[in-house]
Image (cartoon, grey):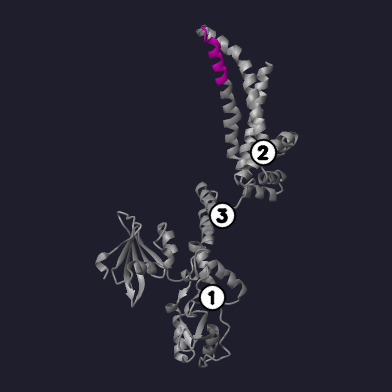
Amino acid sequence: MGDALGIIILILFGALFAMAEISIAASRKIKLKVMADEGNDQAEAVIRLQDHPGRFFAMIQIALNAIAILGGIIGEQTLTPYTSQLVALVYSGPLAGQISFVLSFLAITSLFILFADLLPKRIAMIMPEAVAARVVRLMNGITFALTPFVMFFNSITNLVLRIFNVPTVREDIVTTEDIVAMMEAGAQHGSLQQQEYQLLGNVFELEGRTLSTAMTTRDAIVYFDIKDDNAAISAKILEHPHNHFLVCDGHLDKLVGLVESKQLLRQLLKGESTQLTDSLIDKDLFYLPETLTLSEALNEFKSAAQPFAVVVNEYAMVVGIVTLKDLMSSFMGDLVTFQGEQQIVQRDNNSWLVDGATPIVDIMKLLDIPEFPNDNQYETVAGFLIYMLKRIPKRTDYINHAGYKFEAIDINGIRVEQLLVTRLSEPESDSTIDSSQVS
């Protein structure tokens, strides 16, 4: 009876140490920090233990090996008499002793594998942070009690690791890939709503997208010439009711400043002739290089109290303008709909009308296309078509890529205004070009 109780006690201790080992190793530092911030002292103790785990794992191995050895000794002595009686019922030959021993060994091993190993480790893996917080203080106490043995084995382990140039301390560096993987897991589980998942994904995209993917391009900028008369100014305001307009001297690359439309409307309401006088023109323009990411542009807007920024290239030529609303639209994605013409319009389940200026990253997200060839060479879907054709597209020119057909359907001069994107019935792995259209 005493030996049976000893086996039960050893199994319980084995289960305790197995749970402690797995839970402390599997606990996520991010969740532990949240628990610690909420006042959980045990979670803070787990974090400290994870930062310097050597002594803890040395203690665990000492304890588990001691339990395994004692379990084998006590178990064989306890179960062999019973297995001998069972074997004697069916066999009494010269191998009866060996058979009884094998049965005792299998029985005690099965008990330890099931109740001291598999079950406790499964429980610890299911809720590692909760289990680790409950056992950490007890484990620290046992480690302290076994200090001489722990220090001996831990020192030898550290020496071997240093010989092979292996770090002795774990470094928890959370990368963007780790966060994205956690987001995807949360979205699949349902703990992260689809809108939250999309919003967080857009945050990471801000670092990978440049201003050219969000700005109003040069050819779409509506501006006043310093020499514009009353009729020209009034017509532009009526046709394009913007809050602010650039003022230029002849062309866009010779900027004078900007003017608020309400200042000009005030003149019109008074019955006065609208004039672009120096008193109305704000000459403090806000410039941003086109190489900035959307995240960097947002930071620049924080320090500059300006309604919009003029985007310039390395040759100081104006390539577009960008407003804070443009940046927020890129950030919010489909969660908020801003007024204005949509760049992508779905015709049916298998085709879309796409503006040529649509950023290629938006196409990748919409159609779930993992990559485009050499996508660092262009920013827009029109740029993709031009890059693949190696020339300015003509109407009906197309490219097949990733199971989709990208066809130019509206060309204005040398500008690709609109494309038709169609899902192919038989997806093609490589990008192909309409050879009949290539000159």
Give the position of the C terminus as an image quadrant.
Answer: bottom left
Q: Position of residue 355 (x, y in %)?
A: 39, 69
Q: Quadrant of residue 55?
A: top right
Q: Is residue 8 left or right of residue 145?
A: left
In the image, what residue occupies the spot 57% across and 35% down? 122
Residue 92 or residue 343, whichever sits in front: 92
Query: Which residues fall within the magenta stretch?
Result: 93-106
As rendered, which of 337 and 107 lies closer to the eye? 107
In the rendered image, residue 236, in percent from the top left (x then y), is placed at 45, 84
Is residue 424 part of the magenta span, yes or no? no
Judging by the rendered image, the residue that carries numbered circle 2 is 156
Q: Could you tell me residue 49's position as x and y percent?
A: 68, 43
| Residue type for callout 3 | Thr
Instruction: Residue 421: name its quadrant.
Output: bottom left
The CA distance from mark 3 to mark 2 is 32 Å
User: Which numbered disc covers residue 288?
Assistant: 1
**CA distance for labels 2 and 1:** 58 Å
Numbered mark located on residue 11 in the image: none
Check disc 3: other Cα within 10 Å, few if <14, some if 14-19, many if 20+: few
Local secondary structure at mark 1: strand
The residue under label 3 is: 175
Question: In the picture shown, does residue 155 fall above or below 269?
Answer: above
